[in-house]
Each structure stands twice: as structure tokens, then as C-alpha cells.
Amino acid sequence: MNYTSEEIRKALEDNEFCVYYQPMFVTMTGQLKSAEALIRWIRPDGTFISPAQFIPTAERSDLIMDIDWYVTESVCKTLEKQNTMPQFPISVNFSRRHIREKNFTENLVSIVDKYELPHPLLEVEITESAMVGEEDKLYDWIVSIRNAGFSVAIDDFGSGLSSLQFVKDIPADVLKIDKSLLSHNCEDEKERIVLESIFNFAHRLNMKTVAEGVETKEQLAFLRSCDCYKIQGYLFARPMPESDYLLLCQSNNVSEQSEDVLQIQSNTSATNLLLQAVLARHPLIFFVNLTRNTYYAMAYKNFTSTGCPSTGIFDELIGHGTLSMHPDDREIFASTFNRENLIEKYKQGEKFVRLITRQLGDDGIYRKVETVDCFVKSSYSDDIIAITLCENLPE
Ligand code: C2E
Ligand code: CA
Ligand code: CA
């Protein structure tokens, strides 16, 4: 049954609403990390009314805003009770109406400050679908919340017509992946590919990831392999009343030595760490298919001269590179990285080809650079592949 907004408003005034907490855990270690606040309507006779029966009605008017602020205040009260015990961040669901609310961030700050709570203890959740159509205001709204020290999560990602293009421009901290993307045991190959790509995409954009609706061990195992940061779901805990949540927090001693991340990490996270180190050292990287005479630039950050397209014909890249070299270095550069020469070296069993030259920077100054072509084996093809790592050398 659905309720009218008058009934809902009266229930709010009569204090029939309360907040339940559903904990979130670190996927790799199972440690308690945070919680989500979920509203519950409990009638005086004990009847439980799920949010699905009144949130949609409340969302048709500003009533939802009163509900969300009520939840925010309740969350602050809960956090205040934890002053002498471990406190974990709590996320609050905000309806799309808040995006256009005047002084949203100021209101949030004033409530949280009233309880003297550190701002990082509060996270704002907003569903991806709520953001569509609000693009003009959205960016500033999120930036102002984050500038005030709160974190922002995109909720229910994947539940509607999700667009990676859209999400990539939203400066959120967290991407919550909707439960509808997880089948019972994640055994479908295509589903796994979609999820792996979403996690990879979010991590590359430096967003933390949360999977919601995790109910089975199979889902957990798969999410670990995707490096999903946190999980929320019945497998670990259902939404619970405040008293149970406080007990749970109390029994979780955060000062306990946590596991060494290097021992529990998946191959993906090891690769990500390695990639960070490689990118720190080599701001310009190309993937080169010597058989097909093509290349793709993987990264170019603050490199001396980067006036080349991000993808194209390898011979042209070398021609372009040669011209950017000091005149005395051009011949050696062109002959070393000539495609035939590289293929020859590969066939002779060389692992890499390396050269130091002087390259002209955008500022008109020549700098020493090292170029190394490493031969690698692709598991998908017999083409001869090389990775070009470029590095600025100190003078
Ligand atoms: P949501 O934000 O996506 O919240 C997660 C929902 O998934 C919750 O439903 C939670 O109980 C449920 N859930 C968690 N783990 C599992 C699981 O393992 N399996 C399954 N099947 N479900 C799981 P709930 O509490 O019924 O809330 C439903 C929706 O109502 C929320 O979806 C949120 O959109 C809305 N809502 C709840 N509280 C508030 C609030 O304070 N303000 C606003 N604006 N919306 C709220
Ligand atoms: Ca939510
Ligand atoms: Ca959700």
C-alpha cells in the first residue's frame, strides 16, 4: 500500500521514522569501514513500512527534503553517541531535489557542526538517475559538498541507462555499483566482463568502489578479483537498528593492526600499483605493433615534447620523433627505432632496444631523454609488440 503525503508528514511529526544502519566492509579483509543510513517507518502498532512504500510519494514534493534532513540529524546524533568509541563514516541518501536546494552545503555544515563532528564522517549519496537532467547545477553542487570536507557517492550505478561518459565528468569520491548488476553467483561471462570494466574504469578515475546487494560467497569472491573496495549486503550484515549498530562498532577495534595490503592484494591491484610506479618514471609510453606498423600512446604527462597524435602509424611517429631530436642525434635515433631494425633485433632474441638522445622541449631547450623499446608477448596474437618507455634524464 502507498501512503499520502499528509500521512507521511504526520508520521514525521509524530516521530514514527527512525534510521537503520547497514554496515559496509572492506572487501579484501572483511573489516567494518562505514555504514549507510536507511530510513524506516515503524507505526505505533509495530508495523514496518518499507521506504519503497513512501519515498516515491515523498519525492513528489519537498517533503523528501524534510525526511532527508531528519535522517541527517539522526545520523549526527548516532555519531555523537560514538564520541568515546570507534566512529565510522555514515552515508546519507539525498533526493535529487537537494541539487537545486539553496544553501544545501551550508545546511549540511551547520547540522554537522552543531554536533561538533569531523566532516569526513558524513557522506552524501545521490543516485545516478537523479543526476540526469541536473547537469547544469550538479558539478558545482558536488564540488561545494566536497570542498566542505564531505565525501560524495554516486548511488545505484548500473541500475538505469548508466553512462560512463556522464560519470567520468562527475567529481565524486565513490561509485556504488547497483545490486542489479550482480547475478546470484556472477557466473555469466558477459556480466563479469561488464563488472570488471566498471571497476577498472572507476579505479582509473580514482574513485573508490562499493558493491551493494552482496548476498553470496561467489559474489564476494568475484568482487575481490575486481578489487572492489567495499561491500554492502546481506552476506555480511542487514540494515540494523541504531542500538545494534553501536554494539557492532564497539566490538570493532580500529586500532587493531590491519592486514598487510601487499599480502592480500589481487593481481589487478598489484598491477595497478606497478602501473603507478611505471607512470611516475615514464611519463610517455607507447604501445607499438611492429607487425602492423601502428601505435597507441598510453600516457604523456609533462613530457618534453608531446606533439604527436595519441594513435597512428608507427613509422610516422618515428619520423616525428626524429625531427624533435638534436640534429646530431637524428640519424642514430632514426636507424635504431626503424621498424625493420626493431623486428630484426626481436628475431635475434633481444629483450629491448635502448638509446639516449637529446630532444627539443616545448621551451626550446634540448634535454636528455632515454627511449627504451621492450618486446612483449600478447596472449591474443603473434604480432610483434613493443612497449616504448620514454624518460627525461637529469642533466
Ligand atoms: P538504496 O539507497 O539503494 O539502499 C540500498 C537498499 O538495498 C536498501 O533498501 C537495503 O536494505 C537494500 N539491501 C542492502 N543489502 C541488500 C542485499 O544484500 N540484498 C537485497 N536484496 N537488498 C539489499 P531499503 O532500505 O528498502 O531502501 C530502499 C531505497 O529507499 C534506498 O535504496 C533509497 O533509494 C531509498 N531510501 C532509504 N532511505 C532513504 C532516505 O533517508 N532518503 C532518501 N532520499 N531515500 C532513502
Ligand atoms: Ca543509497
Ligand atoms: Ca543503492
Image (cartoon, helix red, strand yellow):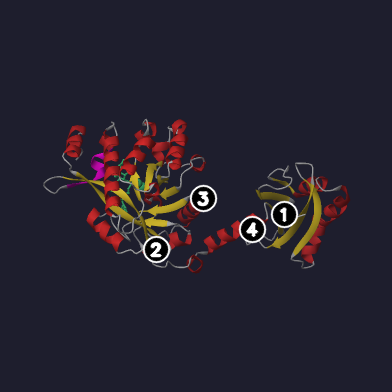
Q: Which residues are drawn in magenta?
A: 48-55
Which residue occupies 40% across, 39% down? 129
Residue position for label 2: 218
> Which amino acid type corresponds to the residue marked 2 in the rendered image?
Glu
Q: What is the distance, in whole Å, between disc 4 and disc 3 at their CAs?
A: 17 Å
Instruction: Answer with mark 1 or mark 2, whichever residue precedes in sequence.
Output: 2
Q: Secondary structure at mark 1?
A: strand
Query: For residue 278, which numbered disc appears in the image?
Result: 4
Instruction: Give left or right: position of 14 versus 37.
Output: left
Please identify the quarter of the rendering in which residue 56 is found: top left
* Amino acid identity at mark 3: Asn
The residue at the point 42 percent across, 68 percent down is 257
Q: Tell which tag, 3 or 2, sits nearer the viewer.
A: 3
**Residue 195, position in %: x, y?**
47, 53
- The 10 Å Cα crowd at callout 2, few under 14, some 14 to 19, many 20 or more, is some
Sooner in the amino-acid sequence: mark 4 or mark 1: 4
Question: Residue tagged by mark 3?
Answer: 206
Q: CA distance from mark 4 to mark 1?
A: 10 Å
Mark 4 or mark 3, which has the lower sequence index?
A: 3
- The residue shown at (51%, 40%) is 169
Q: What's the amino acid at mark 4?
A: Val
Q: Earlier in the sequence, mark 1 or mark 3?
A: 3
Is the N terminus in the top left, top right, bottom left or bottom right quadrant?
A: top left
Q: CA distance from mark 2 to mark 4?
A: 33 Å
- Residue 17 is situated, as x and y percent measured from the top left of the image, at 21, 44
Give the alpha-carbon distance from disc 1 to disc 2, as whole Å. Answer: 42 Å
Q: Is mark 3 within 8 Å of ligand 3?
A: no
What is the quadrant of the C terminus in the image? bottom right
